[in-house]
Amino acid sequence: MFSKIHTAAILGIDAYLVDVEADVSDGLPCFDMVGYLSSEVKEARERVRTSLRNSGYRIPPKKITINLSPASIRKEGAAFDVPIAISILAALGYLAEEDLKNTLLIGELSLDGKIRRVNGILAVVDMAKKEGKTRCLVPSENAKEGAVIEGIEVVGVESLAQTIDVLKNPWNGNVSQFDLSGVRESKNLNQNLDFSDIRGQKMAKRASEIAVCGFHNILYLGPPGSGKSMIAKRLPTILPEPTHEECVEISKIYSICGMLSKEQPFIIKRPYRAPHNSITAAALTGGGRFPKPGEFTLANRGVLFLDELSEFKKSVLETMRKPLEDGKILISRLYGAYEFPAEFVMAAAMNPCGCGYYPDLTRCTCTPQEVGRYLNKISRPLLDRIDICVEVPDLLVEELQTTILDESSETIRKRVEEARKIQEKRYKNINIRFNSELSEKMIDKYCGIGTKEKSFLKRIFKTGTYSARAYHRILKVARTIADLEGKDTIGIRHLSEAVCYRSLDKKYWRIKDE
């Protein structure tokens, strides 16, 4: 007696199809499981056996063999309990093959036959739809999450007995639904934070607008209390609205990490992550023996804010180079390679020296050597990958006391969204969304400049120490500035502003550690 059930497993941030094959035959009574299994999957033996008994199903003393295919990929987690139990019942004749057609099952069993929630349901249901499945039976606590994916039936079940009843009588199952329009209407765009709260700092706010518009990395440099963190925390309030595809992509990552709430199983806002400076390299980029997503991936399509950048370990900062360049992380292990997305706005804030007040020599207590050592914690190769560096100076008392409010986040966001539409139209036939994602070949096509503009950049590069990477990033930032103005071509003033955002290192990082 043989049966086969379809389920799924998570590999990195994607789900893949797993076939659970059960064979029940005469022979010495045993319960064997094969297929490159982790210890928690092997423990399913006792959970399934006890759960079946407590659900009223008797397993005869026969030789039971369970195979999870493909056997070349390691399976982990407790989400295989339900498909293993159902495959055994199907092999024993409790269920017909027709009952299981085009159906995917997943869930963890408790000893009394109840089904517990598992992580990654959103990715699993999305994969099941692409594989041509018409129905998914998932834990009832995950049903709302799975129902986000349209075009496939998602039925929430609470127990093993209910699962069998739904398989035999499909009309007894309640297909879960998710009101996406209702969620979008009731969303709260950080009402407690607004750019109108920020006094002064016109240049920093302008640079922030450019950064979120084109998804460029930005560094705020200034003394303590000047408003660097305050500005960075308000970046999500002016970010362009994510598309539905981006929302699904973000929600899948958080689903796999078990970070979706029951009340809102679909993320409709861009994420904002602000890890502490004591974080490890593995926690930031993702890792482990069997790699899991890190803060880079959790910030995908959103903002990653690194406060007190110079206080991060140098080894941690250096791991950021390749993700900031490629927009993805490739982690290789003995068991395979894992690719995690890492496309985000990297916002960082730091002081210019240990005491925080350089170059104000009336307040700075650091020696030139101490200033140099402090700044050199941020290497030039890493600094070269930051598109925009902006100084955030101390505020005047008059600016703090003013009662005139500056532009609100809503006003700025409208301009950003208009520029976002220009980018969306420009790149509709290629697989990118923002100017920062342009490759070198694409820059020649979409960031072309005239003779005057070329001469201008030539003069700039003759007088400064700029790299080839800086040249391309200046063009991408200039393209974003032109988009904010609604201009089709890049002019000298767009290039001039972009160059200014690359010149802060000439003021600070020229100090030598002697």
Image (tube, rainbow, N blue to C red):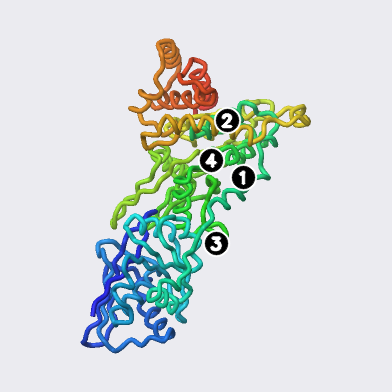
Q: Secondary structure at mark 2?
A: helix
Question: Mark 2 packing: few (<14 Cα in 10 Å), some, or many (20+)?
Answer: some
**Mark 1 or 2, nearer chain start:** 1
Chain-order first, disc 4 or disc 3: 4
Q: CA distance from mark 4 to mark 1?
A: 10 Å
Label 4 residue SS? loop
Residue under the point 50% across and 22% down: 482
- N-terminal of the pair, mark 4 or mark 2, is 4
Q: Is there any visible trace of residue 445 in the rendered image?
A: yes
Q: Earlier in the sequence, mark 2 or mark 3?
A: 3
Secondary structure under badge 3? loop
Marks 1 and 3, how far apart in space?
A: 20 Å
Residue 310 seen anywhere in this rendered image of the structure: no
* Residue at numbered disc 1: 189
Q: Position of residue 463 (x, y in %)?
A: 45, 14
Front one among 474 and 22: 22
Instruction: Report x, y in % for residue 470.
Output: 42, 25
The residue where tag 3 is placed is 262
Question: Can you give x and y, in whole percent of width and height, for residue 204 in the image?
Answer: 60, 29
Which quarter of the figure is the N terminus placed in?
A: bottom left
- Between the residue at mark 2 and the residue at mark 3, the CA separation in whole angstroms equals 34 Å
| Residue 220 occupies quadrant | top right
Q: Give amino acid for label 3.
A: Lys
What residue is rendered at 38% in x and 79% in y?
A: 48
Residue that carries the numbered disc 2 in the rendered image:
415
- The foreground one among 192 and 104 is 104
Q: Which residue is mark 4?
A: 241
User: CB atoms at circles 4 and 1 under 8 Å apart?
Assistant: no
Q: CA distance from mark 1 to mark 2?
A: 16 Å
Q: Are marks 4 and 3 in contact (CB under 8 Å)?
A: no
